[in-house]
Image (tube, rainbow, N blue to C red):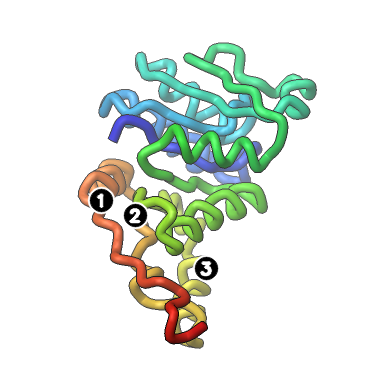
């Protein structure tokens, strides 16, 4: 794995462990010589993970829409800052640049980005590992809800199992390196049309 995209909050949340784990993830990526691709901001967990990479000799690539740069949240010390016009272009560019995805704690934007990449994997548009760093059980309720989707017949187990989850950074990176995407059957075939 050469590059990992990290989706995470633009705030720090209510527990210091979120910030410390974001920074530790950045440090660990640098130690593994894995470049960071992320949203390009200097605030919240976004800034912490970038700082963790940069302070440890790693490379951090930010992808930021122009309208957010004008709000002066762009990280000033990145290896590279790629400016795009829209949020959709941002996600597309982040996907193009990465070999896998990790979600840290965050809000609506984090979930939207994570689920879009996961949906693209489900549809077979890419075969990259999609992971959750479940810091302090932040995503426990979401993981339970995803199981409800399986139990109620709206999600296949094979697609649930595409989500790699751990609260341990090194274990999560190892899981990502060993990930093999499932064969995705076509949604529609000639007999069903």
Q: How far is disc 1 from disc 3 in space, using C-alphas?
A: 22 Å
Query: Which one is nearer the viewer's eye here, 72 or 13?
Result: 72
- Locate residue 88 relative to residue 27 in the image: left or right: right
Task: Name the residue beneath numbered marker 1.
Answer: 175
Give the mark nearer the N terminus: 1 vs 3. 3
- Locate residue 154 relative to residue 178 in the image: left or right: right
Q: In this picture, is 141 found above or below 164? A: below
The 10 Å Cα crowd at callout 3, few under 14, some 14 to 19, many 20 or more, is few
- Locate residue 142 relative to residue 126 in the image: left or right: right
Image location of residue 40, percent across then percent down: 59, 26
Where disc 1 sits, the SS reads helix
Q: How far is disc 2 from disc 1 in space, using C-alphas?
A: 9 Å
Tell me what residue is drawn at x 51 percent, y 16 percent: 80
Tell me what residue is drawn at x 36 percent, y 76 percent: 157
Q: Quadrant of residue 98?
A: top left
Q: In this picture, is 49 found above or below 135? A: above
Query: Which one is nearer the viewer's eye here, 152 or 85?
Result: 85
Q: How far is disc 2 from disc 3 in space, using C-alphas?
A: 14 Å
Task: Name the residue beneath numbered marker 3.
Answer: 141
Query: Which one is nearer the viewer's eye here, 146 or 138?
Result: 146
Tell me what residue is drawn at x 52 percent, y 29 percent: 48
Image location of residue 193, percent across then percent down: 52, 83
Q: In this picture, is 42 found above or below 149? A: above
The reply to whether dot 2 and dot 1 touch (C-beta < 8 Å) is yes
């Amino acid at each position: 794995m050469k590059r990992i995209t990290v989706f995470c909050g633009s705030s720090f949340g209510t527990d210091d462990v979120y910030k410390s784990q974001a920074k530790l993830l950045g440090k660990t990526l640098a130690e593994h010589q894995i470049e960071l691709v992320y949203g390009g901001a200097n605030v919240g967990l976004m800034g912490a993970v970038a700082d963790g990479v940069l302070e440890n000799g790693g490379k951090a690539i930010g992808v930021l829409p122009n309208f957010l740069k004008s709000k002066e949240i762009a990280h000033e010390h990145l290896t590279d800052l790629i400016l795009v016009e829209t949020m959709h272009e941002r996600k597309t560019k982040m996907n193009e640049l990465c070999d896998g995805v990790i979600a840290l704690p965050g809000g609506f934007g984090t979930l939207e980005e994570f689920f879009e990449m996961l949906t693209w994997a489900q549809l077979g548009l890419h075969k990259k590992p999609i992971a959750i760093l479940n810091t302090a059980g932040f995503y426990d309720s979401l993981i339970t809800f995803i199981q409800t989707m399986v139990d109620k017949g709206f999600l296949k187990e094979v697609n649930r199992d595409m989500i790699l989850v751990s609260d341990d950074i090194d274990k999560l990176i190892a899981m990502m390196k060993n990930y093999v995407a499932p064969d995705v059957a076509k949604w529609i075939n000639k007999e069903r049309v």
